[in-house]
Amino acid sequence: MKDIFIADAHLYDPADANYQALLNFLSENREDIGTLYLLGDVFEFWIGFRYTVFAPYVPLLEALRQLRAAGGKIVFVEGNHDFHLGPYIEEVLGCRVLPDGGIVEIGGKKVYIGHGDLINPQDRGYRILRRFLRSAPVRVVARILPPDWSWAIARCASALSQKTHEAKSVRWAPEDLLENHARQRFAEGCEAVVTGHFHAPLLRRIENKTMISLGDWIDQYSYAVYENGEFSLKTFKTGDQ
């Protein structure tokens, strides 16, 4: 059995190539996955209602249900596009949800997993926005709004988020941020750090410890694997590659 780590698929339409690729990947690997770690922004947008799910995500939710039925576990870290994951993800799918990431034990090793949006302490504006969006009042309002309204608002916010993400990548070098963050976690006793958010696939050994940035599942189809005591960074080959 192997553990799989995926982030930043930003799934939107089941007809999209990256959506189909993820469904194919999960189908091909369903019997071999011990734990699937989804490290945020798997959905382009998700707010967790109790009895309602967004129709475009039904195929993925069914693939995750099949993975659970095959004996696999799922750990979901909330991202900046999918948060307030709610009772469906936790209660129906049986996922373990870590809103801010955290330390998990994998193969006897302490591994820090996170989306990566909190790595940069200088990005104060985002931190304020993040705290507001995840607050209890916003959670209540989001679940009162009709799902169609939430979806429309989220699409506008996503377009703005993409522009600011590109600007921040120029202002702050992702590799420096990732390494500084990893060294902090290593000092706390972690043997590996796995994050997403930056859409930059990277595996680096630092003092016999492992730092991984997952890249994305938009056009890179990059993911990490933990198997036989080792981490590796791989690419899923689609029919178009």
Image (tube, helix red, strand yellow):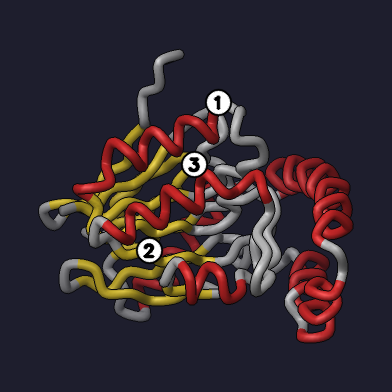
Helix, strand or loop for disc 1:
helix
Q: CA distance from mark 1 to mark 2?
A: 23 Å
Which of label 3 and label 1 is nearer to you? Answer: 1
> Which labelled disc corresponds to residue 195?
none
Name, please, the residue furthest toward the left: 228
Q: Residue at x 44, y 76 (%)?
A: 102
Q: Residue at x 27, y 46 (%)?
A: 30
Q: Residue at x 24, y 61 (%)?
A: 71
> Which labelled disc corresponds to residue 215?
3
Residue 23 coordinates in the image, percent (x, y): 44, 38
Q: Residues within 10 Å of mark 3 (few under 14, many from 20)?
A: many
| Depth check, front residue: 152 or 205 | 152
Q: Is residue 120 visible?
A: no
Q: Report the amino acid beneath label 1.
A: Ala
Q: Report the amino acid beneath label 3.
A: Gly
Q: Is residue 202 left or right of residue 165?
A: left
Which of label 3 and label 2 is nearer to you? Answer: 2
Q: Is residue 70 left or right of residue 38?
A: left
According to the picture, the residue beneath numbered tag 2 turns out to be 74
Q: Report the amino acid beneath label 2.
A: Ile
Please give the count of numbered marks on the rendered protein: 3
According to the picture, the residue beneath numbered tag 1 turns out to be 17
Helix, strand or loop for disc 3:
loop
Q: Residue at x 32, y 41 (%)?
A: 233
Closer to the chain start, of discs 3 and 2, is 2
Q: Tell me whether the residue at label 1 lies in contact with that at label 2, contact meaning CB atoms closer than 8 angstroms.
A: no
Q: CA distance from mark 3 to mark 2?
A: 20 Å
Residue 53 coordinates in the image, percent (x, y): 65, 59
| Depth check, front residue: 237 or 170 | 237
Q: Is residue 134 visible?
A: yes
